[in-house]
Amino acid sequence: MEFTSSFGSTLFYDYISPSKEVLWLWLASIFSGIILCFLVYTSTAILSSLLFKGYGKLSSVEKSEWNNRGFSTFHALFVSSASFYLLVLSDVFTVKSHDDLVINKSSTLSDSVLGISIGYFLTDLAMILWSFPALGGLEYVLHHGLSVGSITLSLLTGQVQIYILMVLFSESTTPFVNLRWYLDIAGLKSSKLYIWNGVALFFGWLVKEVFIFGVYPLLMVPSVLAVLNIFWFWKIAKGLLQLTFYFNL
């Protein structure tokens, strides 16, 4: 849908007008994400009660967090794998010509992945608010709220999905965080697995921070170049005015 500004001839587009097919795809993906969370939550409870003797001795709050971290791990493995495939292995974000801006690229698969991720964040946010602050404080509410907002905006506009997927790929460190908590609750802090998991967690976060540091220049460089172009244009215009004034004299 196209609109004309009353202050000039500048045009902008309303991207938030998806077709019925696309809208149903988004809704199905979000709903699938919610259903998967509940299925994994229930499966985690059943399997843990059968395979881990200490599970029955946990408090109700600890059991809730134990199961919650189950679908948190599932989402992290799913979304990091899907992001890696879309960013590295597939040709979704491949620039085939100068007219194809990578920030405008998307696909049915990337839309589905983002929809499922929204479903996860909504489910986890609902559980956090329901048992607040047992499963997390305000920082978790802020994180999940911003995640839902940014992913939804990217999904609606079909833009900057490549950057959203880059951030979602960093969820690959979440399983190590959850395993650390599991081992702590199970009384295995002195085990070799706990130590090696800590080492993997450290290097995982190190790689993620280096990666994020590399993304920031990618986002900032175009803005800096735009400011420099405006500055140089101002100098050219100033020189032209001075030259015009000189010849008028």
Image (cartoon, rainbow, N blue to C red):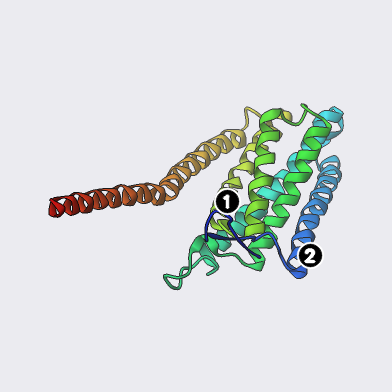
Residue 152 as seen in the image, left or right of residue 221: right
Q: Residue at x 24, y 52 (%)?
A: 236
Nearest to the observer: residue 177 or residue 117: 117
Q: Is any part of residue 170 visible from this angle? A: yes
| Residue identified by numbered label 2 | 24
Q: Is residue 61 above or below residue 10?
A: above
Percent coordinates x, y for residue 207 in the rendering = 47, 43
| Three-letter amino acid code of the residue under disc 2 | Trp
Which residue type carries mark 1?
Answer: Phe
Q: Position of residue 231 (x, y in %)?
A: 30, 47
> What residue is pinned by disc 1?
169
Could one spot residue 179 in this view of the protein?
Answer: no
Q: Secondary structure beneath disc 1?
A: helix
Comparing labels 2 and 1, the label whose residue is closer to the camera:
2
Q: Residue 85: percent from the left, percent from the top?
A: 57, 62
**What is the secondary structure assignment of the residue under circle 2?**
helix
**Foreground residue, 65 or 182?**
65
Mark-to-mark CA distance, 2 and 1: 25 Å
Q: Quadrant of residue 137?
A: top right
